[in-house]
Image: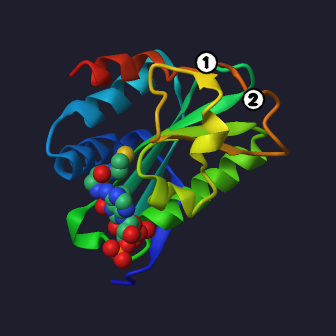
Amino acid sequence: MSGIVVLREETPEDHPAIRELLAAAFKRSGEAELVDALRKDGDLVFGCVAAIDELIVGYAALSRMSAPFPALGLGPVAVGAAHRSKGVASALLRWSLARAQDDQWRAIFVLGDAAFYGRFGFRPELAAGFRSPYAGPHFMALALNGALPAAEGIVDYARGFGRLKSA
Ligand SMILES: CC(C)(COP(=O)(O)OP(=O)(O)OC[C@H]1O[C@@H](n2cnc3c(N)ncnc32)[C@H](O)[C@@H]1OP(=O)(O)O)[C@@H](O)C(=O)NCCC(=O)NCCS
């Protein structure tokens, strides 16, 4: 038992454990079904798993968005209840942001808590100019590889999210 948190991209063998983790963390099946739908639709760009001694304890999904520039949507993000408040989600986010930056994406959008995501540079004011079904104070953006190429336009999450929103 090393107890060390390993961050890596998901593999097909991880899918059942990711499903279980998401269903337990959100206490419903919607987020697990969302990730399955993103994969099926070809919209999941990458999924990052956090593993301790090969047990998956955290997960973050990054999916293709429609936007005026190459942009990813972050979420769902989840950490198993027994492993929270130890920096696992923060590590997942740092890994995912670095990967997105290396892959030349220009922005990541997220819908969530501004205090939490603000730590990683997400800002509601950066997303405020965009028209989106998710627009509002919890809708935030982070610019990668320079300033955002546009400050307004229409942005939307991948198709799979529509199903979650109406769930
Ligand atoms: C949110 C979540 C991913 C955080 O994971 P974590 O590994 O505990 O996060 P970290 O250890 O990196 O950071 C912990 C800090 O995040 C903040 N935080 C955690 N959950 C939060 C929430 N729902 N809202 C705002 N801030 C939150 C707290 O400040 C916490 O600090 P504390 O430990 O001193 O209380 C985890 O609690 C979780 O899976 N929750 C259920 C699913 C969920 O709500 N996901 C996010 C929406 S997509």
**Res 56 visible:** no
> What residue sits 27% from the left and 36% below the top?
32
Judging by the rendered image, the residue that carries numbered circle 1 is 66
Q: Which of marks 1 and 2 is nearer the N terminus?
A: 1
x, y (%) of residue 6? Answer: 49, 68
x, y (%) of residue 111? Answer: 45, 39
Judging by the rendered image, the residue that carries numbered circle 2 is 151
x, y (%) of residue 94? Answer: 59, 61
Instruction: Answer few, some or many: residues within 10 Å of disc 1's Cα (few below 14, many 20 plus, some between 14 and 19).
Output: some
x, y (%) of residue 83? Answer: 29, 71
Q: State whether residue 84 is above or below residue 65.
A: below
Q: The disc labelled 2 sits on which kind of residue? A: Ala
Instruction: Answer few, some or many: residues within 10 Å of disc 2's Cα (few below 14, many 20 plus, some between 14 and 19).
Output: few
Q: Residue 155, located in which quarter of the rendered image? A: top right
Q: State whether residue 125 is above or below residue 87.
A: above
Q: Is residue 75 left or right of residue 73?
A: left
Label 1 beta carbon less than 8 Å to ligand 1: no
* Marks 1,2: beta carbons within 8 A: no
> What residue sits 75% from the left and 37% below the top?
106
Q: State whether residue 165 is above or below residue 55.
A: above
Residue found at the far left of this picture: 27
Q: Residue 146, located in which quarter of the rendered image? A: top right
Q: State whether residue 117 is above or below residue 64.
A: below
User: SS for tag 1?
Assistant: loop
Q: Residue 152, located in which quarter of the rendered image? A: top right
Quarter of the image containing the N terminus? bottom left
Residue nearer the viewer, 85 or 136: 136
Q: Quadrant of ligand 1?
A: bottom left
> What residue sits 46% from the left and 33% below the top?
136
